[in-house]
Amino acid sequence: MKTNRTRDLLSKGKTALGTMIGECASPEVVRTLARAGFDFVIVDNEHAPFSLEDDSRMYRAARTTAMDLLVRVPDAQYHLIARTLDAGADGIMAPRIETPEQARLVVDSVKYPPVGRRGAAHRAIHTDNEPVPLGDYTQHLNANTMVIAQLETRAAIDRADEILAVEGIDVALIGPADLSVSLGVPGEIEHPLMEEYIGTVVAAAERAGVASGIHWGDAAVVRKWMERGMRCIMYSSEMNFLAAGARAAVAEMRS
């Protein structure tokens, strides 16, 4: 069965680089991003209009590559998390985590007993249609399914140490847009208050022994936080890459 490359990189203290799919539910987009060299991609099921069938086609495309495919679920609820994982995702990102109780629910929904309470589903997509004993199956997925907790409000970051003390969280990832709104500085990613709160998460993650990360479309901002210790890096999105490439092509042809 497949080993989670991103989780393995982070567990070894290395950096994992990913991006987000938010508009184009295309297997070819997945394969193109994999060929570009990304370690992982996250499908945005919180804000994008994707169906489970759309997701499934992208999961199957990712299985033909070395890239991991994770999903930002719409909410931290068992039925949304478990169904997404059963369909083939390599992990989930849970938005709007603000309490250790929410974080525990997420881990319980991702992991099989004895770690969590996820219902057993012996899915062919995870075994590549090979016969795998159920005990081996659940043990492997417990070790290879990623859990990213998205901390994106003042309330969440004020309790960052408590949230990240929940065993089973792999990454504390900043949601800078929502955090900026929560702090009263919408879109001001480099505002001193944003710097303070993002830095708080980096420090809390280091104390907890988990990776910290961020998703943003400005490369300079992303590189700055990499230099300050972030290792789970999400840069831009498939639509931004398409738009940038198209603008560059038009500019070159008309120059």
Image: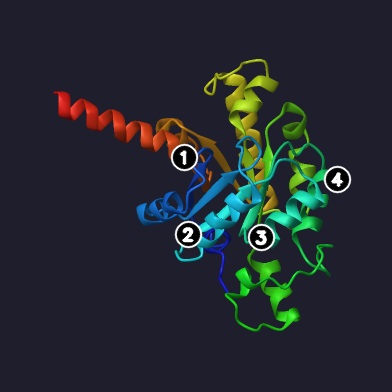
Label 4 packing within 10 angstroms: few (<14), some (14-19), many (20+):
few
**Mark 2–mark 4 contact, CB under 8 Å?**
no
Q: Disc number at residue 67?
A: 2
Q: Secondary structure under badge 2?
A: loop
Q: Nearer the viewer, mark 2 or mark 4?
A: 2
What colour-coding does the image apply?
rainbow
The structure residue drawn at horizontal position 44% and vertical position 40%, both measured from the top left corner, is: 238
Instruction: Tell me the amino acid under the disc marked 2.
Output: Met
Return the disc, 1 or 2, that comes first in the chain's sequence.
2
Q: Disc number at residue 101?
A: 4
Instruction: Tell me the amino acid under the disc marked 4.
Output: Glu
Q: Nearer the viewer, mark 3 or mark 2?
A: 3
Rendered location of residue 91, percent (x, y): 64, 56
Residue at image mark 3: 87
Q: Nearer the viewer, mark 1 or mark 2?
A: 2
Q: Secondary structure under badge 3?
A: loop
101 lies above or below 138: above
How far, Cα to Cα, is label 3 from label 2? 17 Å
How far, Cα to Cα, is label 1 from label 2? 15 Å
Return the disc, 4 or 3, that comes first in the chain's sequence.
3
How far, Cα to Cα, is label 1 from label 3? 25 Å
Rendered location of residue 110, percent (x, y): 74, 58
Asked if residue 119 can be seen in this view, the reply is yes
Residue at image mark 1: 235
Name the one closer to the observer, 60 or 167: 60
How far, Cα to Cα, is label 4 from label 1? 29 Å
Label 3 packing within 10 angstroms: few (<14), some (14-19), many (20+):
many
Q: Is residue 225 left or right of residue 172?
A: left
Label 2 packing within 10 angstroms: few (<14), some (14-19), many (20+):
many
